[in-house]
Image: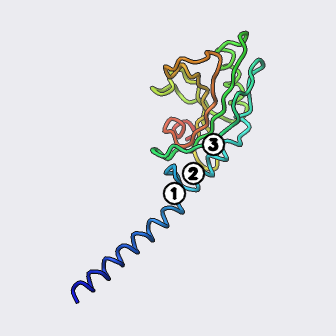
Amino acid sequence: MRWGITLVLAGLALAGGLAVAGVRAVVVDASGCTVEEQRLAAALASLPALGLHPPGARAVKRPYPGCDGDDRIPYAVRGFRHDLTTSRADVASFYADAAREDGWSPVPASDDEPDGRCFAKRIQGTAAQFCVRYPDDRETVTDHHEYEIKIAAAYQDAQDAVR
């Protein structure tokens, strides 16, 4: 009789655990992000800002959405390459003007973005940060004329800038 009760309780515990795991699987995908966070990442990837580039630059990657599963931060990225006659200062100036025209506010320089090439605004009720980054800024040796635009949600600097 004792074994019977133990087996019934163990079965109920297992069924309850599976039910909870099933609910979690519906809410969180393989990256560790919720369906809502994945939707926000897709919305970020469709923003016109990811299609902007200065004269002398061209897209080398399509916009792609993602979600950082560790921090659960939705983002969208697009890669560009500028020609030899376009300087990094030209690129930065172009995006600063374009961001302001589109309602983005400058984000103060930080440890993560020391030169202040980031801007913020609310997207679907969430603070988002729009940054221009060169891969070699992150100590990666690559083509010095390639850069990316990244729009990410929920960075603290972005939240402070849109308050």
Q: Is residue 25 above or below residue 59?
A: below
Q: Is residue 137 above or below residue 161?
A: above
Residue reaching furthest to the bottom: 1
Disc 2 residue type (three-letter): Glu
Residue reaching furthest to the top: 85
Name the residue beneath numbered marker 3. Answer: 65
Q: Which mark is residue 28?
A: 1
Label 2 neighbour load within 10 Å: few <14, some 14-19, many 20+: many
How far across and down, in percent of the image, does residue 15 sit? 40, 75
Name the residue beneath numbered marker 2. Answer: 37
Label 3 neighbour load within 10 Å: few <14, some 14-19, many 20+: many
* Mark nearer the N terminus (1 vs 3): 1
Residue lying at 64% horizontally and 45% vertically, measured from the top left: 123
How far apart are the two marked residues, 3 and 2, measured between alpha carbons?
Answer: 10 Å
How far across and down, in percent of the image, does residue 8 sit? 32, 83
Q: Which one is in front in this view, the residue at disc 3 or the one at disc 2?
A: 3
How far apart are the two marked residues, 2 and 1, measured between alpha carbons?
Answer: 9 Å
How far across and down, in percent of the image, does residue 17 sit? 39, 69
Q: Element at badge 3?
A: strand
Label 1 neighbour load within 10 Å: few <14, some 14-19, many 20+: some
Disc 1 residue type (three-letter): Val
* Mark nearer the N terminus (2 vs 1): 1
How far across and down, in percent of the image, does residue 39 sit? 63, 52
